């Protein structure tokens, strides 16, 4: 019974759409499908790129700067905390804001003095520190590794020296300025400008000699699962109550909150595309119902229930949404996966066109080097993408439901039609 009903609905729906191919209804359907496809495609691409950038920033922050948890206390107590088996990496450090001076240039920076033995065991950190030149060797006294953008600002390279102005003196002597000379042994790049332009690493021994010995130190902790940070902190507080512990969620609360707001605002703007398409479908369906009021009246007179006729138009809206959502899904996934190749192909086409135009204007062809993400203007080498199944599925379903609900509300008008009056005046 249900199977036959579905067949009859699809049959009538096919005839109605076929009959309207020369009218406005088919054009409205086509534009509705294209609108939903465009909305789904754009939303998938934008969210995947945004996720890629955000996850890149988040992973860099967690691996390089904050870790999954930070402990604060004296060195002896921190070494006791290191014995916890749940940690993947653990190193003691101190941080100091300083002014580095290079070749006629100077820049403020954040110098992190680290325990060398513990620091060298942090594999996750060195996966993020891509060394442009030199290496991460800071075990020798008065050696330093600095970020790529910081090195460019100071105009120094590996083997050069940087000067660190500090203030020396004590209770029995006058305070006087003194320059510490540090040799650059490595220049790293993370792809995150805030780190590459401000961070530098030295050994803990060098840091204590320059900045003085501190009673309280810090420890950066990385767990096997970053989501177990609260469990780890509670256990540490129970075992070593004199330690102060801070989660990565609290440490980076402002930054992660800003990323979340940014993503939600972008999502809201793109959802407006679906609302515009839904309104277009709603108006198109109302127009189609008015144009087909005689057909609806005839079907009602032949015994078809108005609810069944209403289901015809809802099914039409569902098919429009499904067709558009599937098309947008395929295009969105293809573009997201191959977005860097698409940009590379675009650059080749533009460069070839520029080279061809130059041969027409100049006798000697000049070098053309058009780049969409030129290093002169952008601090990225490629576009990262990260597609999340839940988000892609939500976008796909939203594309279908927006069309289906628009068709449902438009089809309510069918219930108000009176077949006898329609046929009387026709």
Image: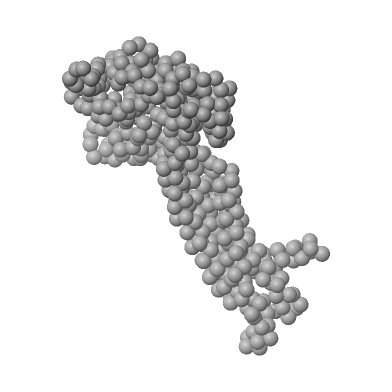
What is the x, y in percent for residue 104? 18, 24
Numbered label tally: 0
Establish if 101 lies above or below 308.
above
**Is residue 186 toward the left or the right of residue 88 in the image?**
left
Image spot of residue 301 (x, y percent): 73, 80
| Residue 421 on image: x %, y % | 65, 87
- The one of 28 and 223 positioned closer to us in this rendering: 223
On screen, residue 354 versus residue 178, left or right, reads right
Q: Is residue 350 left or right of residue 291?
A: left
Residue at image position (25%, 25%) is 100
Residue 216 in sight? yes
Name the quarter where the C terminus is drawn.
Answer: bottom right
Q: Quadrant of residue 311?
A: bottom right
Looking at this view, name the residue that lies furthest to the front: 172
In the figure, residue 134 lies in which quadrant? top left
Q: State which quadrant residue 303 falls in.
A: bottom right
Q: Is residue 275 above or below residue 249?
A: below
Q: Which sits in the foreground, 76 or 317?
A: 76
Residue at 44% across, 25% down: 73
Residue shown at the point (56%, 22%) measured from the top left = 84
Q: How is this picture coloured?
A: one colour
Q: Does residue 410 sit above or below 171 in this rendering?
A: below
Answer yes or no: is residue 26 visible: no
Q: Nearer the viewer, residue 260 or 306?
A: 260
**Residue nearest the observer in this picture, 289 or 410:** 410
Residue shown at 68% from the left, 86% from the top: 420
Q: In the rendering, at what x and y percent does residue 206 appear? A: 33, 16
Quarter of the image with the N terminus is bottom right
Judged from this view, the residue extending furthest toward the right is: 1
Residue 40 left/right relative to 349: right
């Amino acid at each position: 019974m249900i199977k036959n009903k579905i067949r009859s609905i699809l049959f009538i729906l096919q005839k109605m759409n076929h009959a309207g191919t020369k009218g406005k209804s088919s054009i409205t359907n086509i534009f509705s499908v294209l609108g939903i496809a465009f909305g789904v495609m754009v939303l998938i691409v934008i969210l995947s790129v945004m996720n890629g950038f955000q996850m890149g920033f988040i992973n860099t922050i967690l691996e390089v700067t904050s870790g999954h948890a930070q402990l604060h206390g004296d060195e002896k107590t921190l070494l006791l905390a290191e014995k916890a088996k749940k940690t993947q990496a653990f190193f003691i450090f101190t941080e100091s804001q300083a002014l580095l001076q290079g070749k006629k240039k100077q820049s403020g920076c954040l110098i992190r003095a680290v325990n060398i033995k513990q620091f060298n065991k942090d594999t996750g950190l060195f996966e993020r520190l891509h060394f442009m030149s030199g290496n991460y060797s800071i075990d020798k006294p008065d050696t330093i590794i600095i970020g790529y953008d910081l090195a460019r600002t100071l105009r120094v390279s590996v083997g050069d020296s940087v000067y660190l102005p500090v203030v020396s003196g004590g209770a029995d002597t006058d305070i006087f300025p003194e320059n510490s000379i540090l040799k650059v042994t490595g220049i790293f790049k993370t792809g995150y400008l805030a780190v590459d332009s401000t961070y530098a690493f030295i050994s803990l021994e060098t840091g204590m000699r320059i900045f003085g010995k501190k009673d309280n130190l810090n420890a950066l902790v990385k767990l096997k699962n970053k989501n177990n940070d609260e469990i780890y902190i509670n256990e540490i507080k129970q075992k070593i109550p004199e330690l102060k512990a801070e989660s990565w969620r609290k440490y980076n609360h402002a930054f992660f909150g800003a990323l979340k707001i940014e993503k939600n605002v972008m999502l809201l703007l793109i959802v407006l595309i679906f609302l515009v398409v839904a309104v277009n479908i709603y108006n198109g369906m109302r127009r189609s119902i008015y144009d087909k009021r005689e057909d609806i009246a005839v079907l009602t007179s032949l015994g078809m229930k108005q609810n069944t006729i209403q289901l015809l138009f809802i099914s039409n809206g569902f098919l429009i949404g499904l067709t558009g959502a599937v098309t947008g899904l395929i295009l969105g996934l293809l573009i997201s996966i191959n977005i860097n190749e698409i940009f590379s192909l675009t650059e080749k086409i533009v460069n070839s066109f520029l080279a061809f135009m130059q041969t027409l204007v100049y006798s000697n062809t000049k070098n053309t080097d058009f780049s969409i993400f030129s290093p002169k203007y952008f601090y990225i080498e490629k576009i990262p993408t990260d597609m999340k199944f839940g988000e892609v599925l939500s976008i796909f379903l939203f594309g279908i439901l927006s069309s289906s609900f628009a068709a449902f509300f438009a089809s309510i008008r069918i219930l108000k039609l009176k077949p006898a009056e329609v046929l009387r005046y026709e």
